[in-house]
Each structure stands twice: as structure tokens, then as C-alpha cells.
Amino acid sequence: MLVLSYAVIGFWIVPAVLRAKVPPLLTETLGRKVTVDAIRLDPFALSLSLRGLRISEADDGDFVSVREIFVNRQASSIFRRALPLREARITAPSIRIRISPEGELSFADITERLAGNEDHDASEVADKKPFPVIIQNVRIERGQVAFRDESRSTPFEED
């Protein structure tokens, strides 16, 4: 019965909660619409798959899109004070970067927003130690970067 409960919670309940909570949290944090098509969790393999991640541009289109983000934890990681990952894979990431005619980066609003959310109490930050993340195998497959500089007299564009 315990294994069945673990499976039900891991395969269905946790992904449903993540799908309901993660996009609104990221939308609020970034100030941009964030959508996720699917989140799958395998509680026995200790893997998580996030498919169809999209972060919108401030005006229209996608600023960032990723077909899939997949992470697989090591079973031994349950007993450590770290996050050791056997594998982290990002499939088909795409990012569009634009410099406006005024010289502003297309993601400046995100960086300003994140800088505004930081806790400015230096003593509190200095006391905290970073949470260790150890990744054995990282793969980025079929990535694409599009860049457009509209601040020049002749706009420059590269894919």
C-alpha cells in the first residue's frame, strides 16, 4: 500500500501541483508570461521532465522556449545535503535577444525585476552557504540563439 501511495503521489499528484504552481510563480517572478505544456515525474527513477517551457517577450513572441528539461537524481542523493544529478539535459532551447534602437536589451526588464527582488541585507546573505549542486552529465541539444541589434544605423541580425 505504501508503494502504491508513493506511486500515485509521485506520478500524478506532484506533477499536477507543479503544473499549477510553477508557471504562475515564474510569471510573477519574471514579469513575463511563462507557460509549461507538461511536467512528468518518475518517483522510482528519481527523474523530472518539464516539456514545452515558454517565456514570452515583453511585446509578443517567445523570448525563451525549451522543448524539454530533464533531470535525473542519483538515488544516493536522498541521504546527502546536496543535489547530485546523474544527468541534466536541455533539448531544443531557443532564445531571442534584441537590442532596441535606444540600446536596451530585450530582457532588461527581467534583470531589473530580479535585482529588485534580492534581499539587500548583506549580513544575512553572507551567513548563508550556497546549496551544492553536482551534475555528472550535462547535455544541451539542438540549441538556437537569435540576436538582433537595432541600435545600429543598419540593424544587425544573426541566427
Image: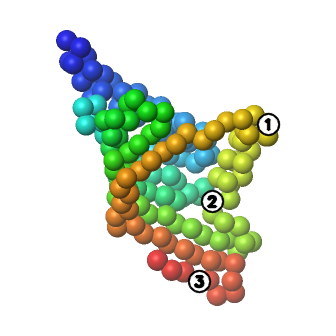
Do residues under tags 2 and 1 come within 8 Å of each other at their CB atoms? Answer: no
Query: Residue 96, position in %: x, y?
Result: 52, 66
Closer to the camera, 62 or 2?
A: 2
Q: Which residue is mark 1?
A: 123
Q: Quadrant of residue 38?
A: top left
Residue at the image position 36 percent from the left and 27 percent from the top: 14
Q: Residues within 10 Å of mark 2 (few under 14, many from 20)?
A: some
Left or right of residue 105, residue 12 in this image: left
Q: Quadrant of residue 20?
A: top left
Structural distance between the alpha carbons of marks 3 and 1? 44 Å
Q: Of callouts 2 and 1, which one flags the residue occurring earlier in the amino acid sequence?
A: 2
Q: Quadrant of the N terminus?
A: top left
Between circles 2 and 1, the one closer to the viewer is 1
Vertical relation: 121 (above or below) 137: above
Q: Is residue 77 left or right of residue 104?
A: left
The residue beneath circle 2 is 107
Label located before the other in sequence (3 or 2): 2
Residue under numbered circle 3 = 156
Q: Amino acid at mark 1?
A: Ser
| Visible residue check, residue 48 | no
Between discs 3 and 1, the one toward the N terminus:
1
